[in-house]
Amino acid sequence: MTETNVPAELTYTPEHEWVRRVSPTTVRIGITDFAQEQLGDVVFVQLPEVGSDVEAGESFAEVESTKSVSDIFGPLNGTIAAVNDELESTPDLVNSEPYEAGWLVEIAVEESDELDAQLGDLLDADGYRQVIDG
């Protein structure tokens, strides 16, 4: 089996999403390299509207592949601040660049302290490796 890419600077959810802080109150979300490998070729991504609320643990988007449709779950509570419009015409970016151009959405919260607390509940790279290694 090939080594799955798990960047150390990101945080993760057990549902195979990664989280990167992009400002004091905003994070960028995507699915992990492991998740895109499991899905196979991504053919469609359904993203929420900017301004929509996201709740931790609740489905807010879908990624459709040649194998299945998978829900994307909120890694934290907040509001959709941006969506990756590139995925509308090139959903395969989720496969080819899961941690860069294949990002899904940005989620904003009111206070940086609130974001700190929510990020503290997520997994670091070592914790996520334990999830995928079973």
Image: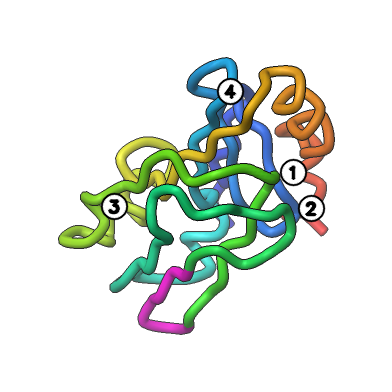
Type of amino acid under label 1? Tyr
> Which residues make up the magenta segment?
62-68
* Number of residues whose C-alpha sits closer than 10 Å to that of mark 3, classed few (under 14), some (14–19) or many (20 or more): many
The residue located at (57%, 53%) in the rendering is: 53
Q: Secondary structure at mark 2?
A: helix
**Is 87 left, or right, of 42 in this rendering?**
left
Q: Secondary structure at mark 1?
A: helix
Q: Are marks 4 and 3 in contact (CB under 8 Å)?
A: no
Quarter of the picture holding the N terminus: bottom right
Location of mark 3 (residue): 93
Q: Nearer the viewer, mark 4 or mark 3?
A: 4
Residue lying farthest bottom? Answer: 67
State which mark lies toward you, 2 or 4.
4
Q: Earlier in the sequence, mark 1 or mark 4?
A: 4
Determine crowd level at label 2: few under 14, some 14-19, many 20+ residues with C-alpha closer than 10 A: some
Marks 2 and 4 in Cβ contact (< 8 Å): no
Q: Earlier in the sequence, mark 4 or mark 3?
A: 4
Does the magenta segment cover residue 50? no
- Residue type for callout 3: Leu
Residue 69: x %, y % from top left = 48, 80
Please name which of the two marks, 3 or 2, marks the residue nearer to the observer. 3
**Residue at position x 43%, y 39% from top?**
81
Residue at numbered disc 4: 25
> What residue appears at the point 61 percent right and 22 percent down from the top-left corner?
9
Residue type beneath disc 4: Thr
- The Cα–Cα distance between marks 3 and 2, rounded to whole angstroms, is 24 Å
Q: Which residue is mark 1?
A: 128
Q: Is residue 66 magenta?
A: yes
Report which residue position mark 2 lands on. Answer: 131
- Looking at the picture, does residue 68 appear above or below residue 10? below
**Quarter of the view holding residue 121:** top right
